[in-house]
Amino acid sequence: MLIIDCPYCGPRPELEFAHGGQAHVVRPADPAAASDDDWLQYLYLRDNTRGVFAERWRHARGCGRFFNALRDTTTDQFLATYRAGEQPPAVPRDRP
Amino acid sequence: MPETLQRRPPPVEGRGWLEPLPAATRFSFRGGSGAIEALSRAYGVPLPTAACRAASAGPRAALRLGPDEYLLIAPAAEGASLAPMLATALGSLPHSLVEVSHRQVAFAVQGPYAEWLLQSGCPLDLDLGPFPIGMCTRSLFHKAEITLWRTGPTTFRVEAWRSFAGYVVELLADSALELPA
Ligand SMILES: [Zn+2]
């Protein structure tokens, strides 16, 4: 089973987690001034990265917290997890 | 392969591995450090600050389920007096205190097979190293959410939501069929 390192609880089995989509999607700071294109970008358009991808996860059957993770979408390997609001840590991009 | 998975259960001694625990007063409490301090004083149990740890004083217990979330468990008889007492102590500090006494039921899984039985449906590693005495957490038993608290080397308190308790107990009993008589 995949083990995911919750930033609050430590390493826990994948079954306890729920996937939450792409991370770091920022809501327009001034919603009234945002154009239709800004809203389209914010609401619907997501990256479909092959490789290292930052995404939200929730420890739904544990502490209940949302956090972010860097996962390699080709190998399903979790490279790092970090708390919501933090910047993604640097990870080596030249892994085999 | 972890050693726990290869370990064969030893023969059963007695049948008391599953014991229903008495009804309890339960609160779901959430709050910041100020509210945690105030509640610790009023409740008489210092709320644990380490992740996934429980603390108790006499019959009262506090389980840290998340960074700002606690499950308080006290005797059923204290229900009527505890709620106003805690609410007064918390005053205007930002917090959430919700009585959830009847949301879930508790039972003890105990004896030499306690770990093995729970391990049959719980994906956590329940070995004493990674899951020591005093550790508590939400997790899953098969597909039902449980709150698990290790109160002794071979004793666990399992809290399951009322409507899922039958599911959890039946599956435990099913696993127990594998134990030698
Ligand atoms: Zn967690």
Image (cartoon, grey):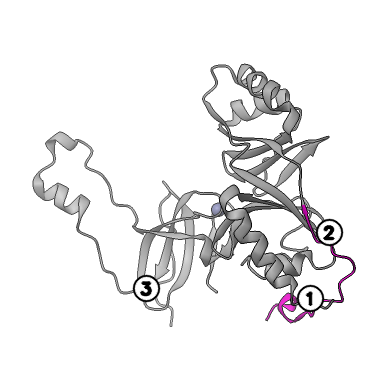
Q: Quadrant of residue B139?
A: bottom right
Residue A25 lies, in percent from the top left, at 29, 51
Q: Is residue A63 above or below residue B111?
A: above
Query: Looking at the image, is mark 1 or mark 2 earlier in the sequence?
Result: 2
Q: What is the magenta range?
A: B1-19
Which is nearer the eye, B22 or B131?
B22
> Of the residues shown, which amino acid type is indicated by label 1?
Leu
Q: What residue is pinned by disc 3?
A: A73
| Helix, strand or loop at mark 3 | loop
Q: Chain of mark 3?
A: A
Residue at (59% x, 36% y) in the render:
B100
**Compared to B92, does A95 lie above or below?**
below
Q: Amino acid at mark 3?
A: Thr
Q: Nearer the viewer, mark 1 or mark 3?
A: 1
Instruction: Find the residue positioned furthest to the left.
Output: A36
Q: Main secondary structure of the magenta part?
A: loop
Are labels 1 and 3 assigned to the same chain?
no
What kind of element bears circle 2?
A: loop
Using the image, tell me which numbered label, if any, was put on residue B179: 1
Q: In the image, are marks 2 and 3 on the same chain?
A: no
**Element type at mark 1:** loop
Looking at the rendered structure, whether the residues under marks 1 and 2 are on a common chain is answered as: yes
x and y percentages locating residue A42 in the rendered image:
21, 50
Image height of B114 relative to B65, above or below: below
Residue at 75 percent across and 41 percent down: it is: B55
The chain identifier of the residue carrying mark 2 reads B
Disc 1 vs disc 2: Cβ atoms closer than 8 Å? no
Q: Chain of mark 1?
A: B
Q: Which mark is residue B153?
A: 2
A63 left or right, relative to B61: left
